[in-house]
Amino acid sequence: MSKYPHVVIVGAGFGGLGVAEQLAHVPVHVTLIDRHNYHTFQPLLYQVATSLLNAEDVGASVRSMFRHQENVNFRLGTVTGIDLSGREIQLDDGDKVTFDYLVLAGGATVNYFGTPGAAEHTFPLYTLMNAVKLRNQVMQRFEAADRDPAAIDDGALTFVVVGAGPTGVETAGALSDLFYNLLPRDYHQLATEKARIIIVEMGKEVLAAFKENLREYARNELEERKVEVRLGEAVAEVGPSSVKLKSGEEIKAHTIVWAAGVQVSPLAKMLGMPQGRGGRVKLNPDLSVPEHPEIFVVGDMGEVSSDGLVLPQLASVAMQSGEHVGRQISRRIAVEETQPFKYWDKGFMATIGRGSAVVEFPNKRTLHGPVAYFAWLGVHLALLSGMRNRIETLWNWGWSALTHDRAARIIIEGEEDVPVLSSGAKSVSTQ
Ligand SMILES: Cc1cc2nc3c(=O)[nH]c(=O)nc-3n(C[C@H](O)[C@H](O)[C@H](O)COP(=O)(O)OP(=O)(O)OC[C@H]3O[C@@H](n4cnc5c(N)ncnc54)[C@H](O)[C@@H]3O)c2cc1C
């Protein structure tokens, strides 16, 4: 047993990693727990789903990240319960882990808002497995349409993206690059121009969080890339091969990508503390939980505020809040007062497709077009974990820029998963 205080961190996302890294030179013993043995770089998941990157490019082994930080031990497992008074957490394999300090960094997951059929028939984009499943689905739909072109009229090549926030816009733009620039070269017989991408958004804007000039630019760019933008339309119900809108219109589509909302990890409920919008745990200004100075929440799971303002669920907020909590644990150990969290806003950005992006700086200045796109590439490359991932990603981006080719157009699934037709696909003869 270590003589140092035991810090347990749940979640090896941006927030959890920020805490663990900050504790490198602090006399503590850290156990970092995650249900996966890798960190997922969520901002690039859509590039895995659209065959630009390999799954391994956006996943980094947690153990290798802490190879040189000996006070961190990784534990693979899913947390299933939290005992606050006993200072103990339970894992799915029956193990219990006691703590002196606990940091919850479980992130967020999909929110279907109770839409009938959405959980069963749509493709969310939160995990690497989600991205690989969506990629399989996209490639399978083109294979199905190639075998039987009549399937196109049934919606085999109609792809509906629900939600026009950054994830929806980036996914729709990337699908357009794939469908209209690359796949026509792969499918000699198929009328690939019949593929449709429809983005459905209940609000009146795409990229609503951005300034008006960027919203307009993004919408025009999407439309130029043959993405049909449907604003002010909400999804009422999703079926196996169609989506029904609240207006009554029904769109035949075998692939519906759900990019419409988030809710916090179920870990937040296990904590039993007051929750705010989207289930985010209410926090003290130093990011500890009310009446439990030894428990902190960072990243998407917490209602992280700075100067009285609740911050959006972004990677930079998660990273900075994690680093802040690392510093506060260190202060507690040194018997010093903790400090309120202060966010350093560096602005935000999104891509619309190849050569096109929008950037909004904290001083409200904006940038769009190819310069913004290169800024986006640089920032995301720098944020990726690990040199190997950066080099692989850069190589894949460079190769794609030069050749319009995409590395990962393969369908990977276990033999037992056959038949391949999922999410609403009609059975199609192989002859
Ligand atoms: C598709 C997509 C695109 C995005 N693009 C951007 C972007 O361009 N820019 C930006 O700033 N932000 C972006 N975001 C948001 C950003 O990724 C999140 O804000 C950030 O990942 C939050 O970090 P986190 O540490 O709170 O959670 P996460 O990074 O989600 O990490 C949570 C970790 O907790 C683990 N976990 C959860 N529950 C348990 C449990 N019970 N037991 C064990 N482990 C558990 C998970 O496996 C995961 O590793 C995007 C998000 C998505 C989904």
Image (cartoon, rainbow, N blue to C red):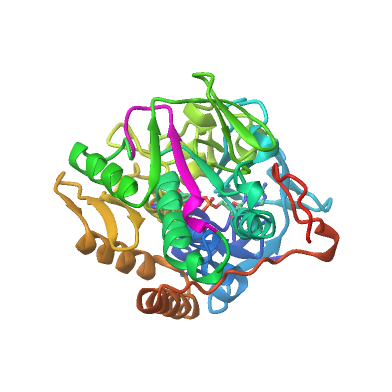
Give residue 326's position: percent from left, percent from top. 45, 56
- The image quarter in which residue 85 lies: top right
- The residue closer to the viewer here, 387 or 191, is 191
Q: Position of residue 141 (x, y in %)?
A: 63, 54
Coordinates of residue 423 in the picture (x, y in percent): 69, 44
The residue under the point 71% across, 61% down is 76
Residue under the point 68% across and 54% down = 148
Which part of the image, by quadrant, shows the C terminus? bottom right
Number of marks in the rendered image: 0
Q: Would you say residue 156 sits in the magenta stretch?
A: no
**Relative to residue 286, is residue 326 depicted above or below?**
below
Which stretch appears magenta?
A: 191-206
Question: Taking 181 as reference, is 278 above or below it?
Answer: above
Q: Quadrant of the N terminus?
A: bottom right
Left/right placement of residue 406 relative to residue 324 reads right
Residue 84 drawn at (x, y percent): 67, 37
**Closer to the camera, 254 or 89?**
254
The residue positioned 60% from the left and 47% from the top of the image is 152
Relative vertical location of residue 393 with respect to residue 236 in this rendering, above or below: below
Q: Is residue 93 found left or right of 133 in the rendered image? A: right
Asked whether the viewer can see residue 335, the reply is no
- Residue at x 53% of width, y 24% of height: 249
Quarter holding residue 62: bottom right
As rendered, which of 176 and 121 lies closer to the eye?
Answer: 176
Does residue 5 appear anywhere in the picture? yes
Is 418 positioned to the left or the right of 403 in the image?
Answer: right
Q: Quadrant of residue 80?
A: top right
